[in-house]
Image (tube, grey):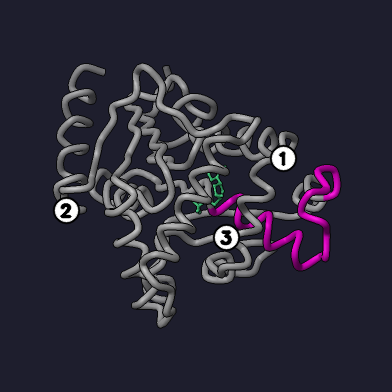
Amino acid sequence: MSDFFQIAIDGPVAAGKGTVSRLLAQKLGFLYVDTGAMYRATALLAIRHEIDLNDEDKVVAILKKSKLEMRNPLPPDEIDGRLTTVILDGEDVSWAIRTQECSEGSSKVAVLKKLRKVLVAKQQEIAKSQDVVMEGRDITFRVLPEADLKIFLTASIKARAERRHTQYLIKGMNNTLEEVIEEIKERDERDTKRKTDPLHITTDDWVLDTSDLSIEEVVDTIAQRVRKIQKQK
Ligand code: DC
């Protein structure tokens, strides 16, 4: 077990992992690591260099040539609603990686085995030297299998689709709820059927269903458990 406290969170798309992890990290004074942002940044990089997103070697090569940094947003400029700050070769791409194109691209590059190996190593390196709340799709069983607390954060398809639909409306996008449900089902299919490290629940995961809980309730419930474990550590 690491000297530092590691919280690993996995779960399907739109389960609230990002918001919960960010607030939890803030409450505990930990670093929040959004691993999905790394897959998104890789997709952005490949798209900008006009690299085929299925070309494993080229995608890995371009990532290795680039510098990808992540940090908690710094006041005042970076406090603009983002959950994490992502710097790619010196450029702040925190918002550029959130487009529909990058979302789709990230789920394509996420199936590349060699790329996953590179990003997993990078994530493990980050968690070696500081307390972290790390979230993604393979954190509890691949990146940090020995984490102090492992959580599978989930919610019903209906709850997840409604949350995502509200986010879209705020952004001015007009997708219908039915379209969002379909999109979520498609993403679930890709995440859980992937050959390399498909998303799944491990036997020692704490499965937390957030369908009927507010964000604050989820964060408080997890923080209470963290304090208990910290006392025993
Ligand atoms: O959580 P997100 O939507 O930002 O993730 C972007 C993509 O990356 C999504 O298709 C799932 C994938 N991903 C992954 O395969 N493994 C992770 N640890 C994190 C994200």
Q: Let me know if residue 71 is in the magenta part.
A: no
Q: Quadrant of the N terminus?
A: top left
Q: Position of residue 183 (x, y in %)?
A: 49, 58
Helix, strand or loop: magenta stretch: helix
**Residue range highlighted in magenta:** 37-58
For the residue with label 3, is its CB less than 8 Å from the closest atom of ligand 1? Answer: yes
Q: Tell me the number on the disc at residue 103.
A: 3
- Separation (CA) of disc 3 from disc 2: 26 Å
Q: Amino acid at mark 3?
A: Ser
Q: Which residue is mark 2?
A: 214
- Separation (CA) of disc 1 from disc 3: 15 Å
Q: Amino acid at mark 1?
A: Leu
Mark 1 crowdedness (10 Å alpha carbons): few <14, some 14-19, many ≥20: many
What element does badge 2 sit on?
loop
At horizontal 39% and vertical 64% (from top left) the residue drawn is 178
Q: Earlier in the sequence, mark 3 or mark 2?
A: 3
Q: Is residue 42 above or below residue 175?
A: above
Q: Is residue 169 above or below residue 181?
A: below
Q: Amino acid at mark 2?
A: Ser
Q: Position of residue 107 (x, y in %)?
A: 61, 50
- Separation (CA) of disc 1 from disc 2: 35 Å
Q: In the current view of this chain or complex, which residue is farthest to the bottom?
A: 172
Q: Tell me the number on the disc at residue 112.
A: 1
Q: Give the mark count.
A: 3
Q: Quadrant of the C terminus?
A: top left
What element does badge 3 sit on?
helix
Left or right: where does residue 219 sit relative to residue 188?
left
- Give whichever of 192, 86 is nearer the camera: 192
Q: Earlier in the sequence, mark 1 or mark 2?
A: 1
At horizontal 43% and vertical 50% (from top left) the residue drawn is 13
Q: Earlier in the sequence, mark 1 or mark 3?
A: 3
Q: Position of residue 152 (x, y in %)?
A: 35, 33
